[in-house]
Image (tube, rainbow, N blue to C red):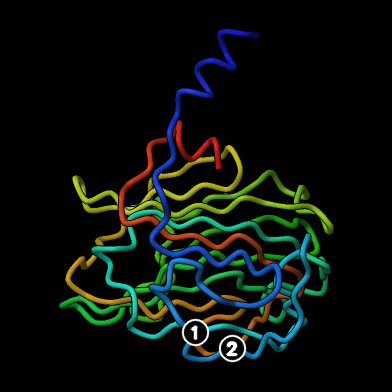
Amino acid sequence: MRRENEIKSSIVLPEPYVHCPFTSNATDLKGNLTWSINTVSTYDATLGARFGGSNYMRAYNQISLQRLKTMCYYVRFDVIPTDGVSSTWQTPHYIRCNNTAGFRYYSFLQHFSVENAELTNCAIINNSFSVENNVLTTPFGSTLINTWYKIVLRVNESNNNVTVFIDDLKRDINAMVPLSYSCDIRLGCNDNTQRYLRGYIKDFRIWDVELTDEQIAQL
């Protein structure tokens, strides 16, 4: 046990480029991001920002993909609907950017159906879902209310793809990253301001370096 603790204590986390705790407001403690739109009005010292099904935050073209190398936040759902997939997705985050082929989107969607409730990541290309190698899920039926999930997205410049994490689950997705473009970052809804989150997000951070798996495990 002592050896394991020594290994953990030896892992150093760099300072984030953006850090919004959401414990009292939406302020970035690092001063590198301001929200272009913020309709969230409720913050809690423990729970973070409250998204009630109609609230969202948007930071438009403020963070370059050269800066967004690792992103992390915690999300907690208040509601797990079971009335069908099309009307009940909730979107904790949504990132849009341009590339030469058009728009490319990266998003975590809370995916519901009568048969399962799971956390799902999808890369959406030109408004169409690209399903190959782009789905990361918890086991069917395992997404719970009042439970915190750690969400991490890491842009891997060496092979130009993205690694996504939900807690300890990890998946590399085959999605080209146009590093020369800036991001349109949304929390609490998708690109069309639909599928709103009902729950909480806290401790939103962006690093301008790629964190290792070991560093991510410490977040």
Viewer-proximal residue among 131 and 67: 67
Q: Quadrant of the N terminus?
A: top right
Residue type at mark 1 is Trp
Residue type at mark 2 is Asn
Circles 2 and 1: CB atoms closer than 8 Å: yes
* 70 relative position to 41: left or right: left
Viewer-proximal residue among 140 and 154: 154
Determine whether 48 is above or below 56 in the image. Answer: above
Figure quadrant of residue 169: top right
Residue sitting at 61 percent across and 50 percent down? 150
Figure quadrant of residue 178: bottom left
Categorize mark 2 by other alpha carbons within 10 Å: few (<14), some (14-19), many (20+): some
Categorize mark 1 by other alpha carbons within 10 Å: few (<14), some (14-19), many (20+): some
Residue sitting at 60 percent across and 77 percent down? 26
Q: Which mark is residue 78?
A: none
* 144 relative position to 173: left or right: right
Residue sitting at 15 percent across and 78 percent down? 100
Q: Which mark is residue 35?
A: 1
Viewer-proximal residue among 135 and 24: 24
Residue hosting label 2? 38
Determine whether 158 is above or below 75 in the image. Answer: above
Determine whether 40 is above or below 172 in the image. Answer: below
Q: Quadrant of the C terminus?
A: top right
On the image, the x and y values in percent for residue 27 come to 55, 76
